[in-house]
Image (cartoon, rainbow, N blue to C red):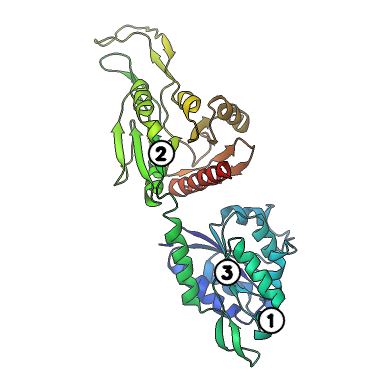
């Protein structure tokens, strides 16, 4: 359930920080990719080395480290996270987040992320019952934070009462519930995906095509299906198996793909144009094998599927792809506008680990507002989820 999920765990300065060791260990055992951010006070209770050993990743404690290659780390972790869990969440940290204060790596990452926030409060009973704290907690809950509420019992200060951090197993359970619910965020939506390459026959033996494997489009179809969508794949030549439970229409030429898309797209809420259809086709076709020392082919443009959908999409979300070899952002933004798409997913196919016939990809997502998201090299299944998350964000913004 948690395999491959990206969780950022924030640890603040409370005695319950020792319990967070168990949380991180269990998340890693369940297959999650865990990054730990510790406040300065948290390091007084548990050493960063402990969490580095448990997570297998460097622990972030300082906004101004200069002993590693430069990156804007709070932005990097904020973009990477699917969920941020703060355990223990002290009254101080909850107050800072509620007030929009970001003066350390953890609070700054929370401010910069679009990922959901889960809080496991831990503090003295008097602090927990303080009206100011309760107001801050309710404010964050109203803003969408998931609260794993404190338990009642003996506290480290010697008091008996509410304020003890929830047990690790309860927090782990809530994290699993979160991802289980998140998988169904496409329930009730219908998604049409084009995938693979088309081919254009030259003669009875030869044809024009390209190197597309269909893996990226099929990964999007698979993840959309897992998240509850009804999925149709219009599929050209491919080197991966279509996921179970999706409808597939097989095509060969760009004209066949065009007709299949135009016949079906009005029934769908989201259209993802991940296929690589041939842009050109021979003007003349020969039933017999063409022979000769020198052959000249005369080509003409094929139908522009993305442009046709963009012109008639109405309120539907349209995602297009752009394989580039130079001027990636400039060319992609032009295509985004020309096709009247909502999102463009661009990749530089000259980069290792990106583009055709690989199990990984490196993409840049751009939308009509000019927002740019660069992923780095990731498995195509993870890229697919990032694209699906972006689609939901755009749909939600349209409905506001």
Return the mark for residue 171. Answer: none
**Where is 130 relative to 354, above or below?**
below
Give the residue number, with chain letter if any, for mark 1: 127
- Horizontally, residue 320 falls left or right of residue 236, namely right
Compute the Cα span from label 2 to label 3.
36 Å
Query: How dense is the environment of label 3, judged by Cα within 10 Å: few (below 14), some, or many (20 and up)?
Result: some
- The C terminus sits in image quarter: top right
Task: Give the x, y percent position of residue 280.
Answer: 42, 17
- Horizontally, residue 327 falls left or right of residue 195, namely right
Q: Secondary structure at mark 2?
A: helix
Give the residue number, with chain letter if any, for mark 3: 52
From the viewer's perspective, is the residue at label 2 or at label 3 nearer? 2
Query: How dense is the environment of label 1, judged by Cα within 10 Å: few (below 14), some, or many (20 and up)?
Result: some
Q: Determine contact: label 1, label 3, CB under 8 Å.
A: no
Task: Give the x, y percent position of residue 365.
Answer: 56, 40
Q: Residue at x 42, y 11 (%)?
A: 299
From the viewer's perspective, is the residue at label 1 or at label 3 nearer? 1
**Where is 301 relative to 94, above or below?**
above
- Horizontally, residue 156 falls left or right of residue 184, namely right
What is the quadrant of residue 276 in the picture? top left
- The N terminus sits in image quarter: bottom left
Compute the Cα span from label 2 to label 1.
51 Å
Give the residue number, with chain letter if any, for mark 2: 217
Task: Give the x, y percent position of residue 305.
Answer: 43, 24
């Amino acid at each position: 359930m948690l395999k491959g999920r990206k969780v950022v765990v924030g640890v603040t300065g409370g005695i319950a920080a020792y319990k967070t060791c168990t949380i991180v260990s269990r998340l890693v055992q369940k297959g999650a990719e865990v990054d730990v951010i510790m406040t300065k006070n948290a390091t007084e209770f548990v050493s960063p080395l402990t969490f580095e050993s448990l997570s297998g990743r460097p622990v972030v404690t300082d906004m101004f480290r200069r002993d590693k290659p430069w990156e804007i780390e709070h932005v990097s972790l904020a973009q990477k996270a699917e969920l941020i869990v703060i355990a223990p969440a002290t009254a101080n940290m909850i107050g800072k987040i509620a007030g929009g204060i970001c003066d350390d790596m953890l609070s700054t990452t929370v401010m910069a992320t679009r990922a959901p926030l889960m809080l496991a409060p831990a503090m003295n009973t008097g602090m927990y019952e303080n009206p100011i704290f309760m107001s801050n907690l309710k404010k964050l809950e109203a803003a969408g934070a998931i609260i794993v509420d404190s338990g009642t019992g003996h506290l480290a200060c010697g008091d008996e009462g509410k304020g003890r951090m929830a047990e690790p197993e309860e927090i782990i359970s809530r994290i699993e519930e979160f991802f289980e619910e998140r998988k169904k965020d496409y329930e009730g939506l219908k998604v049409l995906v084009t995938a693979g390459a088309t081919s254009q026959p030259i003669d009875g033996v030869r044809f024009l095509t390209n190197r597309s494997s269909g893996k990226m489009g099929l990964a999007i179809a698979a993840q959309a299906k897992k998240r509850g969508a009804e999925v149709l794949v219009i599929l050209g030549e491919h080197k991966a198996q279509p996921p179970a439970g999706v409808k597939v229409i097989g095509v060969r030429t760009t004209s066949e793909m065009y007709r299949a898309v135009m016949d079906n797209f009005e029934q769908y809420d989201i259209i993802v144009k991940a296929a690589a259809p041939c842009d050109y086709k021979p003007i003349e076709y020969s039933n017999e094998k063409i022979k000769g020392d020198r052959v000249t082919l005369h080509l003409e443009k094929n139908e522009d599927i993305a442009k046709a959908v963009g012109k008639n999409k109405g309120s539907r979300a349209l995602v297009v792809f752009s394989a580039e070899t130079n001027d990636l952002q400039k060319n992609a933004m032009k295509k985004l506008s020309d096709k009247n798409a909502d999102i463009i997913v661009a990749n530089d196919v000259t980069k290792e680990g990106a583009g055709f016939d690989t199990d990984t990809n490196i993409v840049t997502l751009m939308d009509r507002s000019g927002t740019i998201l660069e992923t780095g090299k990731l498995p195509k299944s993870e890229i697919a989820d990032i694209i699906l998350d972006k689609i939901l964000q755009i749909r939600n913004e349209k409905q506001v």
